[in-house]
Image (cartoon, rainbow, N blue to C red):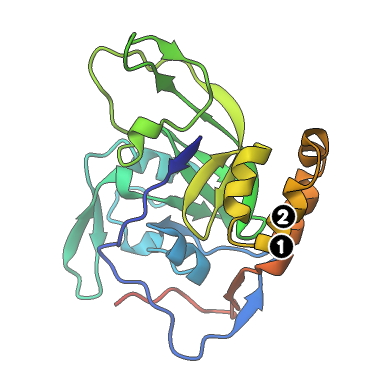
């Protein structure tokens, strides 16, 4: 099972200046605080900064971003000082104190980015469209591809279940952390896919981490060098 996350163009265009110096991503890399609308903004490390978010709060902590999700619209000030609006469900995630949080279901989940493929724990709520019964599958609802914060009448949304997932940053797709779904990502690397498929089922499960690490090494993620005193630029 796979789940497509939001991939929307932000109202504010975030661009890197020409000649931006890149460095190989490592887990100790710090992301700039602010809201991210899509993976491209994450890779460029250029979010919409807190200073552009119109709010009564002046403490830009995790609760600040959680509170944004309760709003009908998030007000943003662009370069010209003109107010623009973003729907909460359009957010890919945010960064606070250098750490990433990804929007999954009806909450944010901390994401320790490992490269173009990352493993992490998440909780979500699903429903059975035919019986209207809650399913504790822990899956990001496939019927909510484009409405992760939506609600449908007649269904229960009270049970949260946890599961392990794979985030494919190159396609912005969330997969279950299984050998079958991992192979779907490995399609982009035929040599690695054939080697992985040649293993017995038990070995595929046992060596998942090894193959994810190898994939990330073969398909490295490069991010901008953070210079002292630098700040995101919006156009």
Q: Is residue 61 visible?
A: no
Name the residue located 17 percent from the left edge and 62 percent from the top edge: 83
Query: In the picture, which quadrant includes the C terminus?
Result: bottom left
**Seen in the image, is 88 located left or right of residue 82?**
right
The relative height of residue 159 versus residue 35 in the rendered view (above or below) is above
**Seen in the image, is 202 located left or right of residue 228?**
right
Q: Which mark is residue 194?
A: 2
Image coordinates for residue 143, horizontal then vertical, percent: 34, 31
Name the residue located 22 percent from the left edge and 45 percent from the top edge: 73
Tags 1 and 2 touching, CB below 8 Å: yes
Q: Secondary structure at mark 1?
A: helix
Residue 35 picture quarter: bottom left
Residue at the extreme bottom of the image, as rendered? 19
Judging depth in this view, the residue of 179 and 135 nearest the camera is 179
Q: CA distance from mark 1 to mark 2?
A: 5 Å
Q: Which mark is residue 148?
A: none
Q: Secondary structure at mark 2?
A: helix
Judging depth in this view, the residue of 218 and 227 nearest the camera is 218
Image coordinates for residue 184, horizontal then vertical, percent: 57, 48
The relative height of residue 13 versus residue 150 in the rendered view (above or below) is below
Q: Which mark is residue 191?
A: 1
Image coordinates for residue 47, horizontal then vertical, percent: 42, 64
Judging depth in this view, the residue of 186 and 158 nearest the camera is 186
């Amino acid at each position: 099972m796979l789940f497509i996350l939001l991939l929307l163009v932000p109202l504010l265009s975030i661009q890197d200046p020409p000649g931006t110096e890149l460095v190989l991503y490592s887990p100790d890399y710090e992301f700039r605080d602010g809201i991210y609308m899509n993976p491209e903004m994450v890779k460029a490390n250029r979010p919409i900064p807190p200073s552009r978010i119109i709010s009564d709060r002046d403490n830009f902590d995790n609760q600040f971003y959680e509170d944004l999700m309760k709003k009908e619209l998030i007000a943003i000030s662009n370069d010209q000082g003109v107010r623009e609006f973003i729907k909460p469900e359009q957010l890919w995630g945010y960064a606070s104190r250098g750490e990433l949080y990804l929007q999954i279901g009806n909450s944010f989940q901390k994401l320790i980015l490992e490269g173009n493929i990352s493993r992490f724990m998440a909780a979500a709520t699903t429903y059975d469209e035919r019986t209207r019964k809650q399913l504790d599958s822990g899956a990001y609802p496939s019927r909510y591809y484009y409405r992760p914060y939506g609600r449908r009448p007649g269904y229960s949304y009270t049970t949260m279940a946890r599961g392990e997932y794979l985030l494919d940053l190159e396609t912005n797709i969330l997969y279950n952390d299984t050998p079958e779904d991992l192979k779907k990502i490995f399609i982009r690397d035929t040599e690695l896919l054939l080697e992985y498929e040649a293993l017995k089922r038990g070995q595929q499960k046992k060596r998942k981490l090894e193959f994810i690490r190898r994939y990330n090494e073969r398909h490295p993620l490069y991010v901008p060098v953070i210079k002292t005193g630098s700040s995101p630029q919006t156009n």
